[in-house]
């Protein structure tokens, strides 16, 4: 939501290292996620807020979820976000970067995987799954 974008922008301005994701999460479970690249996140938030401002306060101004998802998928494909650059591939790359980030912070591999599992919206008990799917670094 636009309110989430504004909240995240405030968090960036406070130099927070994590963002809280409340809306649009799987199962409706809020989660926190680490900010790996503050400059990129700030730029993305500024762009998203500008887009939402031009679309009646919505990033995707469609009447229902199906048409919004169709629009999103079509736009992603049009921009070349397919194959190695598909949204899931980008999630995979982010997870690998996050694992490296936590290891560099001094966490052991098991801890890093548990934290990344939570960052991705899984429970900390899903670290083994995260290791199998995302942890090939």
Image (spheres, rainbow, N blue to C red):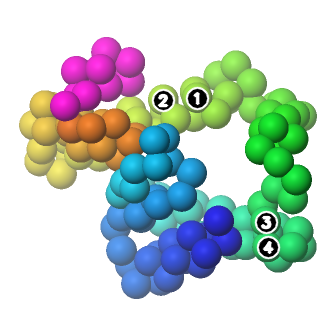
Calculate the distance from the C-alpha at mark 3 to the C-alpha at mark 1.
23 Å
Report the residue marked by disc 2. Answer: 92
Q: Which of labels 3 and 2 is toward the front?
A: 3
Callout 2 secondary element:
helix
Residue at the spot 75% in from the left edge and 32% down from the top edge: 81
Which label's residue is closer to the chain start, 3 or 2? 3
Q: Quadrant of the C terminus?
A: top left
Report the residue marked by disc 1. Answer: 88
Residue at the spot 31% in from the left edge and 25% down from the top edge: 130
Calculate the distance from the C-alpha at mark 4 to the C-alpha at mark 2.
30 Å
Q: Which residues are magenta?
A: 125-137
Residue at the spot 46% in from the left edge and 59% down from the top edge: 21
Calculate the distance from the C-alpha at mark 3 to the C-alpha at mark 4.
4 Å
Which disc, if any, is residue 57? 4
**Residue 31 in the image, given as x and y percentages of width and height:** 37, 54
Cβ atoms at labels 1 and 4 below 8 Å apart = no
Callout 1 secondary element:
helix
């Amino acid at each position: 939501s636009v309110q989430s974008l504004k909240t995240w922008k405030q968090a960036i301005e406070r130099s927070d290292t994590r963002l809280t994701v409340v809306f649009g999460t799987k199962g409706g479970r809020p989660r926190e996620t680490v900010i790996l690249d503050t400059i990129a996140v700030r730029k993305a938030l500024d762009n998203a807020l500008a887009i939402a401002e031009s679309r009646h306060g919505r990033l995707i101004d469609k009447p229902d979820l199906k048409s919004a998802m169709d629009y999103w998928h079509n736009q992603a494909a049009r921009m070349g976000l397919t194959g190695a650059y598909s949204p899931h591939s980008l999630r995979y790359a982010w997870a690998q970067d996050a694992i490296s980030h936590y290891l560099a912070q001094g966490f052991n591999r098991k801890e890093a995987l548990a934290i990344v599992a939570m960052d991705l919206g899984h429970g900390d008990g899903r670290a083994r799954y995260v290791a199998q799917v995302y942890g090939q670094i």
